Amino acid sequence: MFLKKLLLNEEEIPKKWYNILPDLPEQLPPPINPQTREPIKPEQLEPLFAKELIMQEMSNERWIDIPNEVREVYRMWRPTPLYRATGLERALKTPAKIYYKYEGVSPPGSHKPNTAVAQAYYNMKEGTERLTTETGAGQWGSALAFACAMFSLKITVYMVKISYNQKPYRKVLMESWGAEVIPSPSERTESGRKMLENFPNSSGSLGIAISEAIEDAVKNEKTKYSLGSVLNHVLMHQTIIGLEAKKQLEQVDEYPDTIIGCIGGGSSFSGIFWPYYYDKVSGKAPKETKLIAVESTACPSVTKGYYVYDHGDTARLTPMLKMHTLGHTFVPPPIHAGGLRYHGMAPTLCLLNKHGMVEARAYNQIDVFNAAALFTRVEGIVPAPEPAHAIKAVIDEALRCKRKDEEKTLLFLLCGHGYFDMKAYEDYFNGKLKPYNYPKEKVDKCIQKLTELYPWLKNEITP
Ligand SMILES: *Cc1c(COP(=O)(O)O)cnc(C)c1O
């Protein structure tokens, strides 16, 4: 007999997050100011972020305490369940054992409140009255709206216009938690107005929405900005996922041969694999674990992008981060996996990829929805389009185990449910999805624009 569902008690919610910075194979290239090319100093980030979060961003402490008030909120849905994908194993007739950690049980339906709650808490402690942020499909916006409601903060969400119009229910969800939601580009900010002047019909992008949210935070008192992925402190908050998963798998004496997750900015996947990476670097891992990050062929930051310093936003308000990027002028094709449409990637993940420690793959949305549809029929949970990318990779790996008759243990992250994505499933069932493959030539063009802006980057470029 095997267990379908591995659970933990509330008391077993981890008390510390794991910070990977002291354990990286080389020092992480720092964020820099593009004019001076000097590393950004912590004080320079203070108009944007709470002090504690800036400290965490640059900290070399390996374990960081999770405040009790944050754990109190986590208790609402944590520890999250870890399932054995028995239905999928049977359907594939694979000898592989497949497990998935499910983050869809949180109130907003994804992993994102793991960091949103922490960020709202530290801001509340430091006297912030309002947070600003951007959101694409609405998952980050709804997570932060929920978190702000928990700590009585105001929140303004700049939502990419195309999603605002096409995904009204996420907007209503954010409003239900008390958020103000503004379609971006908007007339509220200089960056928005400039964009509308040049492109009156702009349907927006994450890069533009970030510019608007940052500008709003910098120009207003007691207002700070909050980011839902990419940055070190955000990824660290997500390690609660992997720390729990490890305890759960220990209950059944399992250790993963392979860990798989989707990557938009890299936070959820980092959250599940960092604790296993720590095992490896501290000599505690009983075996070698392969790490597979899955992105969309429509937004192939790691598989087709360049590893080079770039801005996090279109208006170039953010410092430059060394990361795999499609160029900050990248405008993503309209795929349904909204969370995977960002031009950049977490610098830590990019560094590990460069060192061959994390493999990256890309799939198109037709293959991805085929995988999601199978998963839904045999496991019952409807996955969000983003983690469906991971499911596609899991199925490929499980079928490979079948061909080679290998009884591997696969662990993947089901980072959110897809119950707000019925339009995407409808389009899929009606055969309306297209298998976008973002062309390399277009990437090259955006990167060329980047090097025209910053000629000093030319020497640094590695594909
Ligand atoms: C935001 C989001 C993503 C992408 O972000 P990461 O930082 O890569 O995790 C993926 N899946 C879901 C469900 C999301 O909400």
Image (tube, grey):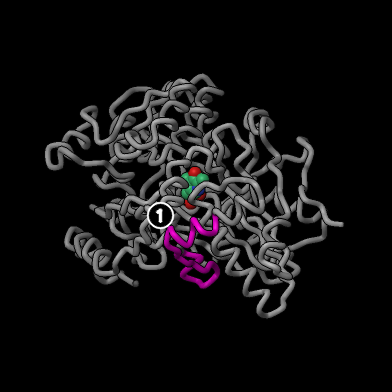
Q: Is residue 365 magenta?
A: yes
Check the image and name the residue furthest to the left. Answer: 197
Q: Mark 1 points at which residue?
A: 431
Q: Is residue 83 left or right of residue 163?
A: right
Please say if 82 is above or below 120: below
Cβ(mark 1) to ligand 1 < 8 Å?
A: no
Rendering coords of residue 367 (x, y %): 47, 62
Q: Position of residue 459 (x, y in %)?
A: 27, 71
Left or right of 401 in this view: 224: left
Query: Residue at (39%, 36%) from the top-left corner?
Result: 167
Q: Nearer the viewer, residue 64 or 450?
A: 450
- The vertical placement of 28 against 57, above or below, is below
Residue 76 placement: quadrant: top right
The one nearer the camera, 318 or 192, is 192
In which quadrant will I find the N terminus? bottom right
- Range of magenta residues: 351-372
Q: Total of numbered circles in the picture?
A: 1
Q: Residue at x 43, y 47 (%)?
A: 339
The type of residue carrying mark 1 is: Gly
Q: Can residue 63 be seen in this view?
A: no
Residue 69, position as x, y percentages in the image: 64, 27
